[in-house]
Amino acid sequence: MPGSSVSWAAKVLAVTRKDITAEFRTRYAINSILMFALVTLTVISMALGLMTPDSDLMAALFWVILFFAAMSGLAQVFIKEEEAGTALILKLSTEGLVIFFGKLIFNLLLLTVLSVLIVPLFIILLKVTPQNWAVFLIGLVLGDIGLAGATTIIAAIVAKATVKGALFTVLSFPILLPLLMAVIDITKVAFGGGNFGDISTGLQLLVAYDVVMVTVSVMLFDFVWRQ
Amino acid sequence: MWWKILIFAAMSAVIIAAFMTPSPMNPAISLGDADVYRIFYFHVPQAWVAALAFVLSMIFSIKFLKTRDMQYDTKAVLAAKLGLVFAVLATVTGSIFAKMTWGEFWNWAEIREVSIFILLIIYGAYFALRSALPNAETKATLSAVLSILFAVSAVFLIFILPRLYADFSQHPSDSVVDREGQITMGATVAAIFFSSLAVFTALFAWIYNVSLRIAKAYDKNLPEN
Amino acid sequence: MLKLEIDKLAKWFGQRKIFEDINLTLEIGQSAAIIGPNGSGKTTLLRLIMGLSYPTRGEVIFSEDGKKLDFDGYRKRMALVSPYLSLYDALTGFENLRFFAKVDGRAVSNDEMNEVLEKVGLGGRGEDFVGAYSTGMKQRLKYAVALLKDPAIFLVDEPSANLDESGRNIVRGIIRAKKKDSLLILATNEKEEYELAGQFCQLGG
């Protein structure tokens, strides 16, 4: 049955759209991620109470919340395919990289939703405002891209494990460490009111990290996926 | 057999030399008891072997992915196991040294302590993944991929850590290199240090070979590849 | 001409031998049945043929006109029906069909989808969520997804698993039809089914 052909980008988006549709109907990942972020945020802001921590500490806390919230949900894109038994037919249905980028985009959207929720709450509850929004936002965007880009392949690895538990966090941490260090540095500058001149090395590093991690994942993904 | 004897003799010589020669400490810029600084002859080679084993394990992982030959997986795991042992040794000796000179076992502001700790976490994560995977083939493939990803991340850390820690490193800068990265060892210190480095590397190679032979003997009833 | 060659294939899981010395050559229009008791490695052999597991020894080669095909080369033309795979419960029958065609690079019309659903006896159920299907209906939908792909290589693991009598008849009809225009491999212990195949591959003694 020959049909009209579909472009590569359309295939990738079909994967993302399928996941979004399924996500809206089942709320598999989004609820747990958002609630996890909210709970962590509440714990931290209550624990800090009347203290007035400096902006350096705030930058670190911001990324700790985002990191753990991301860890609580980003692995689901592959875990649900393995657990539901749909991974096998998916492997025969399209190229591995279509799946990789489809899932990467889905995770990126998930992180965007998470960030949009967390940022205003963080500002309100922890009473800290970025003095330089442009620096803050570029750090946030590059950080989210790095989080999704570096952990998508880890999610595929973890989905194969019999005991998943905290494995995703354990495996992601050493890989995300350079990203977290660079991005916390940038957010510190944003909270402290510095400008782009103060973050040029950090930005270069972040862009290099995002590009390299996605490239290496692309090179290695088929080994993981074709198991 | 002669390997074993040679390493034993050389290691004994290094140990004796390390304690019979003057301490490698430079009293002009260092704190604490001079004798404590002798640990440098053992601590640094251990850290070196831990890092070397990590690189070896990654090379075997790449070879495995290229050939799908399980012997490379066996080699990658062996290198990682030994690397973990040496990483633990380096962490412990480093932290004893820290306690004796700066008064605390651990200091997050110390770049080399942080680095060796990250290496420990990497090894830990590698083995955590292996134990969570169901069969030999999956174990071999996925842990090989993971070890390459860790290596890439490590390259970034090598760039980023020194930048972040530039201002407050406390590591004894007089022992091997100073703050400008110049080697400042005297001739005797250098001789003992590099001998120790060679002996520890040989020790690693010897244990690795023996373990590999044991692993192969155990797998003898497997089909030849 | 598409061709499958399995040459002295052996698979071990660690110290445990699953099978060895499996040989099989198939072309389009030829079929084989893998038979053997439970645990003899039928599903493992299928995974090796699909390229989702690696041989301990020997090889599995798909070639076309003498040229070896890589994974994506034969994957594009391969379909699998198995009790070990599932479709998306959160999507409807139509959405499943459309999704699997689209990620494979094909846009399908409603008519095409209705046609395959009719063929497997799921006519009129396309708008229902797969999660609400019975196991038998899910198994039928897997055949619909496979038929929509019109595979040149068709692998079927336990063809009539979870199916009632009418389902079995439909499936046997599909197998008879695909036998003519594809390279067909069945993994089964049902006599009525393996008798449909032209060759046998006996596992487990």
Image: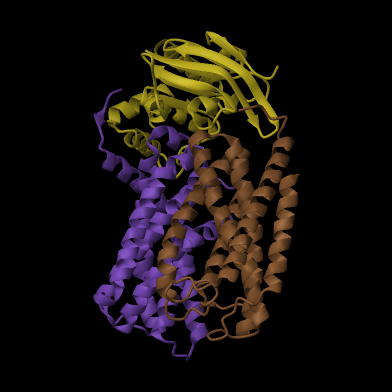
Chain colours: A purple, B brown, C yellow
Q: Residue furthest front?
A: B187
Query: How far across and how far down the image is residue A165, in percent?
Result: 59, 57
- State the residue at coordinates (67%, 35%): C14
* Image quadrant where one finds the C terminus of chain C: top right
Query: How far across and how far down the image is residue A29, in percent?
Result: 46, 57
Position of A127 with respect to B52 (left or right) is: left
Is residue A58 or residue A39 the one in the foreground? Answer: A58
Q: Is residue C167 visible?
A: no
Is residue C145 or residue A57 the one in the foreground? Answer: A57
* Image quadrant where one finds the N terminus of chain C: top left
Is residue C108 or residue C64 the one in the foreground? Answer: C64
Quarter holding residue B17: bottom right
- State the residue at coordinates (52%, 48%): B58
Query: How far across and how far down the image is residue B113, in percent?
Result: 56, 71
Q: Is residue B165 visible?
A: yes
Quarter holding residue B95: bottom right
Taking A9 as reference, is B225 above or below it? above
**How many numbered dots are placed on residues in this image?**
0
Quarter holding residue C105: top left
Position of B8 with respect to C162 (left or right) is: right
Query: How far across and how far down the image is residue C148, in percent?
Result: 36, 26
Is residue A18 or residue A101 the one in the foreground? Answer: A101
- State the residue at coordinates (38%, 69%): A182
Taking C152 as reference, is A65 above or below it? below
